[in-house]
Image (tube, rainbow, N blue to C red):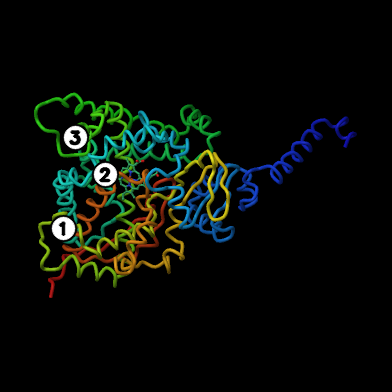
Amino acid sequence: MLEIGLEHPRLAALVALITGYILYSTFFDPLRNIPGPFLARRLPGWLAYQAFTCNTETAILEVHAKYGDVVRVGPNTVLAGSAEAVPKVLGYGEHYLDKGSDYNALVFHTPSIFSEVDKSIHSRKRRIAAHAYSMQSLMRMEDLVLENVAIFLHQMDQFARSGETMDAAEWFKFYAFDVIGDLAFGKSFGLLKRGVTGEFVTHISSGVEYTFVLFLLPSLLRPLSRFLVKWLPIPLFRELNHGFAYVKKETAQLVQERWEKRDDASPQRGDILGALIEATNPVTKERLGFGDLATNASTNIVAGSDTITISLTGILYRLLRNPDKAAKLVAEVRRPSLGDSTSFKDVQKLPYLDGCIKEGMRLTTPFAGPLPRISPRKGFEVAKHYIPPGTIVNVMQCQIHMDERIFPEPHTFQPERWFEDSGGRDLDKYFLGFSTGPRSCIGKNIAILEMKLLLYSLFRRYDLSLSPTTSNLRCLRLLVTKPLSPVLVNIRPAAPVE
Ligand code: HEM
């Protein structure tokens, strides 16, 4: 050894480094007892690699099946995948873990309600904004959503007349973007009317993909990627970066127009932006500033567009793959007591529709990526493993949704499992489509309103079936899931109810 050291100093340094690393990882590494794949435990980027190769769901289910409820997938990253982990990590009340600094990659203007990592700033902002997403504000938004439903149905009538198949993934995207444009900025993107994707939405999509890639990359690589995306003459990189800048600029401009008129005597338009402009902290009377409004408007577009698209696509796809279940939904929505003039009051409490939405979202997992949280100062215990302070912890939706200890026969589509008399209320705790706890989706009520009004109208008005040319639903799963393959649907006017 002494001879190697003297004659080959570089080799000696390498041997010393490897020996040091083996000693550290065997005796001192605080995560040394948490099992995981050999390379994944030691190198950063395992989750990013699975996302970029479209393999997240399969890989997550495999490592949990092989290594148990807690799996190490990086030098400082673990997956916690059991019922017990849900409240411990995502939490209820005061007890929940902080969001990790990866969320900084999702900041468009200033940190939004979504990307804010500081607990006290977040809860202050959420408290002010809560009114804008409440049931009371929802009632003001219903008419705006119904206007978009009407345009959607008008277009579907054309398909029903012509006998052409319609691509549900594409048309749900038009619907989702138009509604959220209308609600977040007071301006629909007009995709439903034109039947094609416009410039704004194309830029939004590339801007969002850019932030998701940054979010997934190990933090060390992020500054380098920002540099490469800006300066490398690769068209895709340029497009992604341009999309990000475009969204920032355009959203600020759209919000500016409304901001300037905020003190006009006339009431605000009944959309989220109007409600956010009016919103006041009930205790301190504090209001949101321009920066907060602009950042929340961009966040709402990102959080409420692809998520609705994939949820609706997944729900319809599963229903049409299971015609017996679709028939039960048809029986529910075509009850003569329900009117043709759709209203949320009527559709809100339809148990089968409710079950279809939860079950479709459970199987499709709209948020497929990690939602990283940081282990607290004293660490915590989950599934008999101690997780030391500062560890990044991920509860992956797909793992909880596919856990047969929680959802028996997890791969089957069973809307009935959500009925109250089948124990649906207990299952609700493990439905992570909108996540759970204090950082769960603040837009959930709006999303449910949009989806229920559309699905109700669709199944009441048409007979639907999958075209035989539709293959299995393939998806891109960066952070939010996106359909990659079309879902081709035959659409005919509904047969009269007997
Ligand atoms: C089906 C549609 C939707 C799904 C599946 C969904 C899902 C989620 C999930 C899983 C989270 C937690 C993310 C995390 O932990 O980092 C979240 C947060 C959030 N969502 Fe949604 N969402 C949907 C629709 C919407 C809509 C329509 C809006 C706005 C109008 C919205 C706004 C937000 C915001 C602002 C947050 C951050 C909440 C906070 O941290 O306090 N979402 N959403």
Q: Which residue is mark 1?
A: 157
Real-space Cα separation, disc 1 to disc 2, in angstroms:
20 Å
Provide the secondary structure element on which disc 1 rests: helix
Judge by depth and name the residue closer to the eye, 45 or 464.
45
Q: Nearer the viewer, mark 1 or mark 3?
A: 3
Provide the secondary structure element on which disc 2 rests: helix
Q: Which residue is mark 3?
A: 274
286 relative position to 123: left or right: left
Residue at position x 37%, y 58% in the image: 362
Residue at position x 66%, y 43% in the image: 29
The quarter of the rendered structure image containing the C terminus is: bottom left
Which corner quadrant of the image does residue 205 belong to? top left
Among numbered discs 1 and 2, the one appearing first in the sequence: 1
Rendered image: mark on residue 177: 2
Q: How many marks?
A: 3
Real-space Cα separation, disc 2 to disc 3, in angstroms:
18 Å
Residue at position x 20%, y 27% in the image: 257
The quarter of the rendered structure image containing the N terminus is: top right
Q: Nearer the viewer, mark 2 or mark 3?
A: 3
Judge by depth and name the residue closer to the eye, 231 or 263.
263
